[in-house]
Image (cartoon, coloured by chain):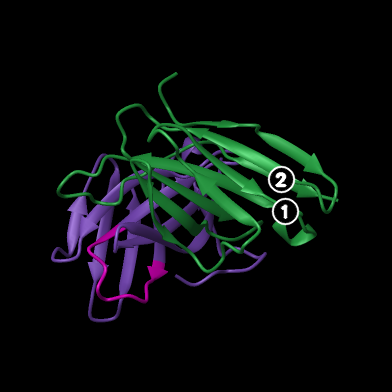
Chain colours: A green, B purple
Amino acid sequence: DTGVSQDPRHKITKRGQNVTFRCDPISEHNRLYWYRQTLGQGPEFLTYFQNEAQLEKSRLLSDRFSAERPKGSFSTLEIQRTEQGDSAMYLCASSEAVRFNTGELFFGEGSRLTVL
Amino acid sequence: GESVGLHLPTLSVQEGDNSIINCAYSNSASDYFIWYKQESGKGPQFIIDIRSNMDKRQGQRVTVLLNKTVKHLSLQIAATQPGDSAVYFCAEYGAQKLVFGQGTRLTINP
């Protein structure tokens, strides 16, 4: 399978615990995005990387959230001291940063977080 | 984009009929407007895009119309099939990121 891979697919945790999600993009895609989606809503932008550089972070990404892409390949999204409001689907997407990027992102199937 | 809350707009059509899904967007400076399809339990999947300087683009069984005067985007699906059942999101692309708009749940009646 050569699509975007996310792990774990489901995570249930207690409030206050830390969680980490991993995303493996399509190889050779140098852009990687994280989005968050809650029930009934469209995905909301969190952050994106071009290669290993994190170029933009949304105001939604509080200090408890950190994302990395150390070698420009896979990425991790860590949430510290989880709160019930963090319960959501965390989606990763990748794309090629070609000259005429049209916004065609390839999404993974997401990591669903439930904070009890 | 504008979020729709827990109650998505819905559209029910008969199998074989044409479907038209509408979306209002907010940012006139966007470079592209895109439609994504999201099936239950899956991530969004790209369907078709349209550059901001165009008003119509056709794909396989789908057509996107862009009316910049009223900031309106529509997706037409011809001969709707059961596999078209999903939530459809419009999105704007600009400044290197996608901003998703309201979703519409499309249900196909046999």
Q: Would residue B92 be found to the left or right of residue B103 on screen?
A: left
Q: Are marks 2 and 1 on the same chain?
A: yes
Q: Find residue A52 and report its horizontal and vertical position in percent.
A: 37, 42
**In the depicted view, which residue is nearer to us: A64 or B89?**
A64
Q: Is residue B23 above or below residue A90?
A: below
Of mark 2 and mark 1, the one earlier in the sequence is 1
3D distance between C-alphas at marks 2 and 1: 5 Å
In this orientation, does residue B15 appear? no
Q: Are marks 2 and 1 in contact (CB under 8 Å)?
A: yes
**In the depicted view, which residue is nearer to us: A77 or B15?**
A77
What residue type is disc 2 on? Answer: Leu
Q: Residue at x 43, y 48 (%)?
A: A33
Dominant secondary-structure state across the stretch colored magenta: loop
Toward the front, the furthest residue is A70
| Secondary element at tag 2 | strand
Which chain hosts label 1?
A
Q: Residue at x 51, y 52 (%)?
A: A35
Q: Find residue B69 and report its horizontal and vertical position in percent.
A: 23, 81
Q: Quadrant of residue B24?
A: bottom left
**In the depicted view, which residue is nearer to us: A19 or B43?**
A19
Q: Find residue B12 and report its horizontal and vertical position in percent.
A: 54, 55
Q: Residue at x 65, y 32 (%)?
A: A8
Query: Where does the N terminus of chain A fall, quadrant-wise?
Result: top left
Q: Is residue A66 above or below residue A72?
A: below
What residue type is disc 1 on? Answer: Ser
Residue wearing tag 1? A87
Q: Would residue A115 be found to the left or right of residue A27 on screen?
A: right
Tell me the tag on residue A113: 2
Magenta segment: does it hold A32?
A: no
Q: Would residue B33 be found to the left or right of residue B56 on screen?
A: right
Q: Residues within 10 Å of mark 2 (few under 14, many from 20)?
A: many
Q: Which residues are magenta?
A: B23-33
